[in-house]
Amino acid sequence: MRFVTYQLHGATELGVRTDSGIVPTGYDGLRDYLEAGDAAAEKLEAYLATDPPVVVPDRLLAPLAERCQLICVGGNYREHLIEAGLHPSEPIYFPKIWSTVLAPGDPLHLPEPTTELDYEVELAIIIGRTTRGIAAKDAFDHVFGYTVINDIGARDVMAREPMQIMLCKSADGFLPVADEIVTADEVDIADNAITCLVNGELRQNSTIDQMIYDIPYLLEFLSRSVTLHPGDLVTTGTPGGVGMGRTPPGYLHPGDVVVAGVAGIASVTTTIAGPR
């Protein structure tokens, strides 16, 4: 199934995108649905088999659980490590704050005085159940589904002393999210292409099997220290080809259109706008 979150007549609701359109699930949001457990999933599958009526939303929102944890992984593709000059010996995690989430179709306003706005396409995992201290072999049992994000960053802010990771990565709107989550049973996570285009130019082009640390290891390592809850989002790193790594650098400017996608999962299109 492909889940979306939408607004209709002022209310926020969780829906499923079908061939006929968007079908309401009867839940206000993703966390409510996930916390309802297997019975809710079975009931929804049976309901969808009846060819239920569809709705036309006023607008789509990011398909995430409200105020979920947003945990990003840095440096998980060798080409990106090389271009960034990084040499980590283990996965690097950092959080983003909720105000970074950018709804599908909303413009990303360039924060002043940033001049080095960068893009990073990433596959993102949506956690399906409470996760703490799990083994890699059990990790996929805790994955509800996947979406695609663009981990926007301000390289000039990152370069300041001391290194401003939070401000670099967590300005308003710095997490554009695709408009749907595809459930894990719907896709085969293998060698899916992961790409990012800027104004139609292919900037990032790899496959997710090129990750240094695979999904089971990332979740095992993270859950040693952090309890993950239903609906939390964990990214998996970006391949080489970011703006910082180009000669000359290929940073984003007002008017640019960025399309970040993972084959078989989703894509997110973001238009860069001027300062608010």
Image (cartoon, rainbow, N blue to C red):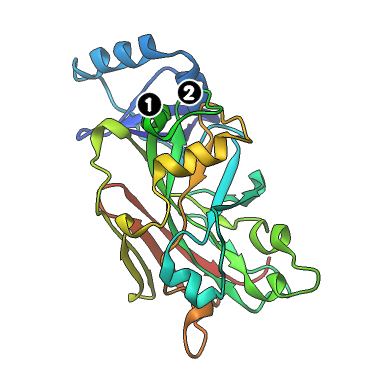
Q: Is residue 53 left or right of residue 39?
A: left
Residue at 24 percent of width and 34 percent of height: 186
- Check disc 2 and report the residue beneath it: 129
Considering every residue shown, the one lying at the far front of the view is 89
Q: Residues within 10 Å of mark 1 (few under 14, many from 20)?
A: some
Q: Point out residue 90 in the picture as x, y percentages from the top left corner.
A: 55, 54
The image quarter containing residue 67 is: top right
Q: Nearer the viewer, mark 2 or mark 1?
A: 1
Q: Are marks 2 and 1 in contact (CB under 8 Å)?
A: yes
Q: Point out residue 141 in the picture as x, y percentages from the top left corner.
A: 37, 26
Q: Earlier in the sequence, mark 2 or mark 1?
A: 2
Viewer-proximal residue, 121 or 240?
240
Q: Point out residue 266 in the picture as x, y percentages from the top left corner.
A: 33, 49
Does residue 37 sit above or below 192 in this rendering? above
Q: Is residue 103 left or right of residue 241?
A: right
**The residue tagged with tag 2: helix, strand or loop?**
loop
**The residue tagged with tag 1: helix, strand or loop?**
helix
Viewer-proximal residue, 230 or 213?
213
Q: Which mark is residue 141?
A: 1
Q: Is residue 96 left or right of residue 15?
A: right
Amino acid type, mark 2: Arg
The image quarter containing residue 166 is: bottom right
Does residue 249 sit above or below 9 in this rendering? below
Amino acid type, mark 1: Asp
State how far apart marks 2 and 1 are (Cα).
8 Å
Considering every residue shown, the one lying at the far bottom of the view is 248
